[in-house]
Image (cartoon, rainbow, N blue to C red):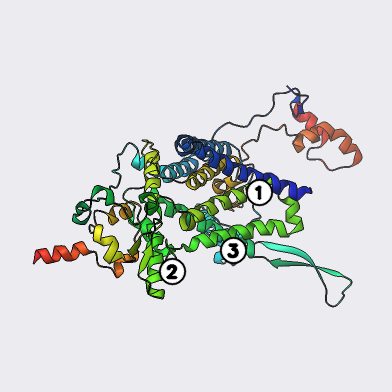
Amino acid sequence: MNFAQRHITVALAAVLGLIAVAYVGVQGNLQLLFGVVVPYLALLLFFEGIIYRVIKWARSPVPFKIPTTAGQVKSLPWVPRTLGDKLDNPESKAWVIGRMALEVLAFRSLFRNTRTELVSDPKYPEKARLVHWSYKWLWLGAIAFHYAFLIIVLRHLRFFFEPTPQAIALLSEIDGFWQFFIPTFYLTDIIIVLALLYLLGRRLANANLRYLTLASDYFPLFLILGIVSTGILMRYFFKTDITAVKQLVMGLVSLKPVIPAGISPLFYVHLFLVCVLLAYFPYSKLLHAPGVFFSPTRNLPGNNRWELHVNPWNYPVKFHPYMEYEDQFRDAMYEAGIPVEKEPEAAVAEEE
Amino acid sequence: MADYKNEFGWFAPKPTVEKKIYSLKAVAVGLGIFLVVFGAPLLLNMGQVHPVPQPSLDTPAIQKLAEKERQCVEPTEWMRANHMQLLWDWREQVVRTGERYYTTSQGKKVLASLSNNCMECHSNKSQFCDQCHNYVAVAPNCWGCHLPKEQNVAKAEGK
C-alpha cells in the first residue's frame, strides 16, 4: 500500500466503522445511547471545544501587522486606489469588516487561487514552460459545498422548532422548487454530493495533492459524504416516520428526551455521524470556520504607516547608543582620524 | 531554568509575554453570537412541552366499521413513513395506464384514489392529514387539485 492508499483506507475504514457501530448498536436496542446520550455528549464537546480554541487563539499575541496583503495601501492623496484596493488593504476597521465579509461570504482568497504548472511549449516540444493560471474550480467546489451545507442545516431546523418558522418552510420550498419526485427533491442535495465528490476527486486526481493529503483530510470528506448519503437514502428511498424523528429532536432540545418508536436504524446512523462531526469539529481542520476570524492577514487593518503596532512580547532591550560607543572608543577613533562628536579634550573637560 | 542567555546575562529571567485575551471585546462579541446562534434551538425550547400530533381516526366512516376491519390499505407503520410514495405511485398508475385498482400487500384490491378511497374514511383532513404535515412543515401539493371533503360538507351544512 502506498502513502495515499494508506491514508484513504484509514479514513474510509473509520467512517464505515462508525456506520457499523451505530447500526449494530441500534439493532441491539441501544436507541437511548445513540438517540440521547451521544447527541448530548457531542454537543457538549462541540461547544466546549470551540470556546476553548477561540480563547486559546485570543490569548496568542500578534507580533506585527502584515503589510503585504494585496492591494495598494492608503498613501499620498494622488496615489489612486480602487475599491478592490480598499477591500484588500483596508485602512480602517470598517474596511476590515468589508474584507472579512468578502472572505467569509464569498471565499475571496480561494477566488484568487492560481495554479502553477509545467506545460509543453508548442514551439519547442522538447522544452517545458512554467505557466501560472487562474484556477477557479476549487473556489466553485468549495462555495457550492459550503452554501449547500448551510441551506441543508437551515432546512433541518424544521425539526428543532415547533411551530416551524415561516422562513425555514419558505427556504425548503425554494430549495424544492422543481417539485420533482416525492418527497420533493431538493436541489441542494445533488449540489452537495457533486461538490463533495469534486473536492474528494481533486485530492485523488493530482499527484502533488495526493502526497499532501492525509487521513485527517479524507476523514471529514468521507464523514460528510456518509451523512449526506444516509440523509438522501432516508429521504428518498428507505423512508422513516419523520413525525417520530421530530418528537425525538424536540425532546432533545427541550431537555426532555424521549425515544419514540418507529424510527429506522438508518436515522440513527445518520444522527450518529452528525454527532461525530460535531464532536470532531473543534479538534480538526474544520475549525477554519472560527479560525478565519483570527487570520492576521484578514483581521488587521493595513495602517502600519500611521499607527504603531507594539509587539506584545517586547521586553526591555539593553541598547548601546552611539554616544556611549563614542565615549568608549573616542581616543582610538581620534587617533585613527575618524570624526567624533566631541573632541577628546572637550570630553575630559566635561567629565571634570 | 534552561541554559539561556539574553542581553541581561546568563540565566537572566526570561522575558514573559503578558497573559491576557487580546481584543477581548471582539472575541466576546464573536463568541456571544456563536453561542446564541448555535444554542438558539436549546435556548428557545428548553423546558417547554410540545404536544405530539395525534392524527384523529374519529370519523363517521371509521366508526361504522367493525373493530377488526379498521385497517388501512397497508399496515399503519408502513403507511406512516411511505404514504406519500403510495399516493404518488397511484397517481402515475391511474393517469398513465388507466388502471384504477391497487392490489395491497394482503392481496386485497382497492380503488387507487385519494378523494374516493383514502378520504372516504379519513374525511377529516384538518384532524388527520394536517396534524403531522403541519408538525414537520410539509406542504403536500395534493390539495392543489383535490378538494378536502370536509370543506364541502361544512359549506353544505352552512347553507
Helix, strand or loop at label 2? It is loop
Furthest residue toward left: B159
Q: Give how far across and how far down residue A36 sits, in percent.
A: 44, 36
Q: Which residue is mark 3?
A: A140
On the picture, is A215 further left or further right than A42?
A: right
Label 1 vs 3, first from the N-terminus? 3
Distance CA(mark 1)–CA(mark 3): 19 Å
Residue for point 66% across, 48% down = A217
Q: Are marks 1 and 2 on the same chain?
A: yes
Distance CA(mark 2)–CA(mark 3): 23 Å
Q: Give how far across and how far down residue B66 sits, in percent.
A: 23, 50
Q: Give how far across and how far down residue B129 sits, in percent.
A: 29, 56
Q: Give how far across and how far down residue A123 sits, in percent.
A: 85, 78
Let me know if residue B145 appears in the view.
yes
Q: Which residue is mark 1?
A: A217
Q: Which residue is mark 2?
A: A178
Number of numbered discs visible in the structure rendering: 3
> Looking at this view, is A9 or B114 the one in front?
B114
Residue for point 89% across, 35% down = A332
Q: Are marks 2 and 3 on the same chain?
A: yes
Residue for point 57% across, 67% down = A82
Q: Are marks 1 and 3 on the same chain?
A: yes
- Rendered view: A171 above or below A121: above
Q: Give amino acid for label 3.
A: Leu
Q: Give amino acid for label 1.
A: Asp
